[in-house]
Image (cartoon, grey):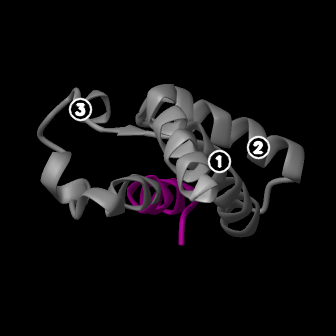
Amino acid sequence: MKREQQQQELFREFIDYQLKPFNITYNDVKGDPQWYMRYSTTIEKETEFRDYITKRIESVLKLPKKDAKSEACWFILQWGLTTNPSISKKLFKEIKKQKKK
């Protein structure tokens, strides 16, 4: 498989991975140039996503970890979902509240 084709397949995989919690895929959003602004994620989930795509880039494109992490950060910068810190704060408050009970 050619490198360009591998990159395209990874691109779709990464978008699908991000959109899985919303039960949609790349095919659902490909006609919307602003799709990545319409959905948000937590900072923790973004970190988890970055780690996942770094490993996939290392494995599929055979890049060293440092380069794979750099590529992952560029992908997130361009195509990553917006992060919403208030989601994390709300979740933290809810967990803290439940622990007090």
Residue drawn at the location 20% of the way across and 29% of the way down: 33
**Most extreme residue toward the bottom, as rendered?**
1
User: Residue 9: percent from the left, percent from the top?
Assistant: 44, 62
User: Residue 7: percent from the left, percent from the top?
Assistant: 52, 54
Which amino acid, mark 3? Arg
Q: Quadrant of the C terminus?
A: bottom right
Q: Nearer the viewer, residue 100 or 17?
A: 100
Q: Is residue 50 left or right of residue 58?
A: left
Which amino acid, mark 2? Lys
Q: Is residue 13 above or below residue 40?
A: below
Q: Residues within 10 Å of mark 1 (few under 14, many from 20)?
A: many
Residue identified by numbered label 3: 38
Q: Residues within 10 Å of mark 2 (few under 14, many from 20)?
A: many
Q: Which mark is residue 50?
A: 1
| Cβ atoms at labels 3 and 1 below 8 Å apart | no
Judge whether residue 54 is colored magenta.
no
Which amino acid, mark 1? Arg
Secondary structure mostly taken by the magenta-highlighted segment of the chain: helix
- Secondary structure beneath label 2: helix
Residue identified by numbered label 2: 69
Q: Quadrant of residue 31?
A: top left
Q: Quadrant of residue 13?
A: bottom left
The numbered mark, 3 or 1, whose residue comes first in the sequence reads: 3
Q: Is residue 99 left or right of residue 91?
A: right
Q: Nearer the viewer, residue 1 or 51?
A: 51
- Secondary structure beneath label 3: loop
Q: Which residues are magenta?
A: 1-13
Q: Is residue 23 left or right of residue 36?
A: left
Q: Quadrant of residue 36?
A: top left
How far, Cα to Cα, is label 3 from label 1?
19 Å
The numbered mark, 3 or 2, whose residue comes first in the sequence reads: 3
